[in-house]
Amino acid sequence: MASGSALIFDEEMSRYKLLWKEDRESAIATAVPERLTVSYEALKTHGVTQRCKQLPVRQATEQEILLAHSEEYLEAVKQTPKMSVEELMAFSKQYSDVYFHQNIYHCAKLAVGATLQLVESVMKREVRNGMALVRPPGHHSQRSAANGFCVFNNVAIAALHAKKNYNLNRVLIVDWDIHHGQGVQYCFEEDPSVLYFSWHRYENQTFWPNLPESDYTSVGKGKGRGFNINLPWNKVGMTNSEYLAAFFHVLLPVAYEFDPELVLVSAGFDSAIGDPEGEMCAIPEIFAHLTQLLMPLAAGKMCVVLEGGYNLTSLAQSVCQTVQTLLGDPAPRLSGLTAACERSAGGYGLCPLWGPCPSPRAPGGPQTCRCSDDGKAATEAAETLEFGAGVLGPSALIRY
């Protein structure tokens, strides 16, 4: 019986940054190196790293990267270490919302390699589960394109690697990042051996990546039809209640029927309160509960891989909550839960596809943050977020 939780981190993956000035409205500048180091230091400060089995990071091989990417794209990225700043800028402009640096190819190979190290350790039952703190993230990158801060698709490569090397027939990928992981969807939309679930800001296709295939009607193609589940949020300001409702009403019934042999989590913490991209109101403790709900699946074989998260304090808290739960700590009590907002699942459009939907929010009573059209409630909540006794306090303190 496997025991213990792995943690994979290498500061080397923080050694790239934006080399030029971007338009102030661009989100690219939020993808800072500190995202990685702040998360690890929070774990270290609160004694979490000492409780984990820390695994070494390796570079992915070209053959491993080619599981999910084309040779032409790999060859193009391989040229970036030799490029000038001007050439890097021009190369970046070929893709959407991504920047390249002379070190990013090296870092991207480490990110894939770290993810594969975690999967191998879990599949060999050297550990029960674990988390890989990686950078750059991966869930937006596509077969022949970088996209959304992502170069290589870490989780997609991990799923393909696990299927190939461990003869897996059922892999579950849960994506709780605030952006749709379209790269993962494209990779597996015709594959019935991979069940992909993503919730994300959508707002009727007005939120990035602005794709019609991010809507709930995209359920897979061919043999993969029914194995892709999108839960698009058409409002901001979602709370713990909406996140739990999404798991209990949509994901978990399907996941248990699917009965995965491995669970991979694209863990984007831009879905936590205070994040400028997400504008949501779910506190970091919610990720302890989401993690705990997934742990009984696949006999506990669960690999959590960092994706987004751009409020450094909220990110650090969320990472700590996740890793503590992987280690077996009980999830902290959530207070102030109310009925889920009726608009939380893109209206009731999901009902015909996925069964019962959450009940409308009850009028009156305590409400921590209403789902809203303009993000005002989420902004106000973020401004009042306090971190009290530190990253691992019993709950984020929210006052209105």
Image (cartoon, rainbow, N blue to C red):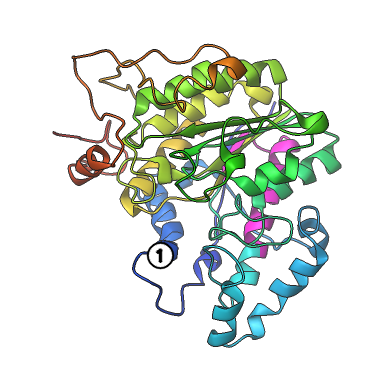
- Residue 375: percent from left, percent from top: 28, 42
Is most of the magenta stretch helix, strand or loop?
helix
Dividing the picture into quarters, in which one does residue 13 lie?
bottom right
Q: Is residue 150 magenta?
A: no
* Residue 120 seen from this side: no
Q: Is residue 179 left or right of residue 128?
A: left
Relative to 399, does residue 157 appear above or below in the rendering?
Answer: below
User: Which residues fall within the magenta stretch?
Assistant: 109-131
Q: Residue at x 74, y 40 (%)?
A: 188
- Residue type at tag 1: Ser
227 up-or-down from 54: above or below: above
Q: Name the residue: 30% across, 17% down.
A: 338
Q: Secondary structure at mark 1?
A: loop
Residue at 57% over, 25% down:
295
Q: Nearer the viewer, residue 349 or 160?
A: 349
User: Between 66 and 210, which is closer to the camera in this rendering?
Assistant: 210
Q: Is residue 128 magenta?
A: yes
- Which is nearer the eye, 24 or 308? 24
Residue 86 appears in the figure: yes
| Residue placed under numbered mark 1 in the picture | 26
Residue extending furthest toward the left: 400
Which residue shows up at 73% across the image and 38% down it?
Answer: 189
Q: Quadrant of residue 30?
A: bottom left
